[in-house]
Image (cartoon, coloured by chain):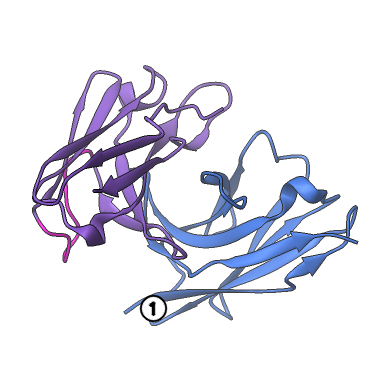
Chain colours: A purple, B blue
Amino acid sequence: QSVLTQPPSVSAAPGQKVTISCSGSSSNIGNNYVSWYQQLPGTAPKLLIYENNKRPSGIPDRFSGSKSGTSATLGITGLQTGDEADYYCGTWDSSLSAGMVFGGGTKLTVL
Amino acid sequence: QVQLQESGPGLVKPSETLSLTCTVSGGSISSYYWSWIRQPPGKGLEWIGYIYYSGSTNYNPSLKSRVTISVDTSKNQFSLKLSSVTAADTAVYYCGRLLFPYWYFDLWGRGTLVTVSS
């Protein structure tokens, strides 16, 4: 069971918009930056969003991130079939079991 | 640009020690935090631990008793040792660069599958 909670799956049609939620607590999301990663089938994760809402160079602005309280959200607009992947949120957890934590991952299906 | 490459045995026997090395190319290992993350087949990501180039470490509490991460700045490499492995340690192991104190992995290796089996 992951420290951060994500929906197991989401789906939408090409061209549509989808959001993926990531829920945590005050010891992790509530007091630390959130990052998001895209993992295409058979490949390593790739950084999509860092410091809650910043995009690395080369990541299109169709991808966005936000944080409010102890939850974070990844948004993807103008969905493309190439966006089909697993998406993970991550952050630092400052509790007694301190360390980097991830959500369980969300499988995005572009119908 | 900076690239990471994992290397090591793909098969380890139960109760033995898993050993992997991550080679950093195209840049210096200095002034950064470096990490190991694993992913069991069909499952999510699990952080194993990190090391600063100076040698200070921090490990996942659930693995701490079995994990050692070390760094060799002369070779631009850092390494993972996981002792007393079982089938539950079968996973793809990734090395990554951790940006502190922003807590995100900006670079990842391609990963290497390690299977624990007799």
Amino acid type of the residue tagged 1 in the rendering: Gly
Count the marks: how many? Answer: 1
Q: Which of the pair A78/B21 is nearer the observer?
A: A78
- Find residue A81 and report its horizontal and vertical position in percent: 22, 59
Q: Quadrant of residue B64?
A: top right
Q: Residue at x 32, y 31 (%)?
A: A32
Q: Which of the pair A46/A54 is nearer the observer?
A: A46
Is B23 magenta? The answer is: no
Q: Residue furthest front?
A: A111
- Find residue B7 and report its horizontal and vertical position in percent: 64, 75
Q: Is residue B72 above or below residue A98?
A: below
Label 1 residue SS: loop
* A60 relative position to A90: left or right: left
Q: Is residue A45 above or below residue B28?
A: above
How busy is the neighbourhood of tag 1: few (under 14 within 10 Å), some, or many (20 plus)?
A: few
- Res B60 seen here: yes
Q: Main secondary structure of the magenta part?
A: loop
Q: Residue at x 56, y 27 (%)?
A: A1
**Residue position marked by numbered label 1 in the rendering:** B27
- Res B72 seen here: no
Q: Which of the pair A15/A43 is nearer the observer?
A: A15
* A19 relative position to B7: left or right: left
Q: Is residue B6 above or below residue B33?
A: below
Q: Residue at x 59, y 57 (%)?
A: B55
- Find residue B44 and report its horizontal and vertical position in percent: 52, 44
- Find residue B69 and report its horizontal and vertical position in percent: 66, 56
Q: Quadrant of residue A56?
A: bottom left
Q: Residue at x 39, y 18 (%)?
A: A25
Q: Quadrant of residue B116?
A: bottom right
Please report, as a chain letter, where disc 1 is located.
B
Q: Which residues are magenta?
A: A52-60
* B80 relative position to B73: left or right: right
